Image (cartoon, rainbow, N blue to C red):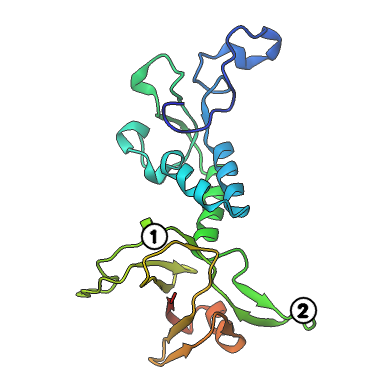
Amino acid sequence: EGLGMYTISASLKGSSFDMGRMMAFTPGWLENQSVWLHMAYKYYLELLRARLYDQFFEEMKTGMLPFMASDVYGRSSMECSSFIASSAFEDPSQRGRGFLARLSGSTAEFLSVWVLMMIGPKPFLLDKHSNKLAGMQLVPALPMSLFRKDGVKKNSKSEEPTISFKLFTAINVTYHNPDGRDLFGESPKRYEVGLRDGSRRTVESSTIPADLAEKIRRVVFVESIDAYFY
């Protein structure tokens, strides 16, 4: 596959028409050897869930929309498609182009991938006996290639590799990676939590305690979280 993506089927050349409607399509189109984005994303998601990090991030470079050229894809990389014309399609100008915009399966899988990469599988911890909130732990899966070294705050000149995201669309979270290494399934060593009343709390642990985790879960009390890996 010249695009570096997975097709829904292998070549059907020479197959019987008993195979069904897929035989009616030109190779590289719809069920006949095209790229079904939501099926490919399901596979990438399971690679990440299985902690096959090296394989996942290698596949991601060619298989996920944020890394595709928009002029090849033919639409915004924020918009998923039902299928992508593969390298088997007869018209080279259409190869890699997305058709039939969809915001269902592919979007759901991509969001699940994003959560596992940026937050981890179970950020909030429950007490086994009381079933009450026991703490919070961020466990990202991020390669060094996604970190930036030009600072995350305005006018910052820091060369420390960082990456930032919004938790619950409201809390600024920044990961600090001074060693410049891959962070695969690893918790921070220290947190600094900025509250909206102007105060800050430092947590010298990989787990945020229950009282502070509750404030984060309620969103409105917390402005920022800085997590340090060293």
Number of the label disc, if any, that sits on residue 128: 2
Which residue is found at the position 48% from the left and 33% from the top?
5
- Distance between mark 2 and mark 1 Cα atoms: 35 Å
Which residue is found at the position 25% from the left and 74% from the top?
158
Residues under numbered marks 2 and 1 in contact, where contact means CB atoms less than 8 Å apart? no
Q: Mark 2: which secondary structure?
A: loop
Q: Mark 1: which secondary structure?
A: helix
**Residue 176 position in % (x across, y down):** 38, 73
**Residue 133 position in % (x across, y down):** 67, 81
Q: Is residue 33 left or right of residue 224?
A: right
Label 1 Cα neighbours within 10 Å, binned few <14 / some 14-19 / many ≥20: some
Number of the label disc, if any, that sits on residue 101: none
**Residue 86 position in % (x across, y down):** 46, 25
Task: Relative to 160, say whether 50 is above or below.
Answer: above
The residue tagged 1 is 144
First in sequence: mark 2 or mark 1? 2
Task: Relative to 165, say whether 128 is above or below.
Answer: below
Q: Tell me which corner region of the image, top left, top right, bottom left or bottom right, holds residue 77.
A: top left
Which residue is found at the position 45% from the left and 90% from the top?
201
Amino acid of disc 2: Lys
Q: Tell me which corner region of the image, top left, top right, bottom left or bottom right, holds residue 211.
A: bottom right
Which residue is found at the position 46% from the left and 89% from the top?
202
Amino acid of disc 1: Met
Residue situated in front as seen by the camera: 108 or 141: 141
Q: Residue furthest right?
A: 129
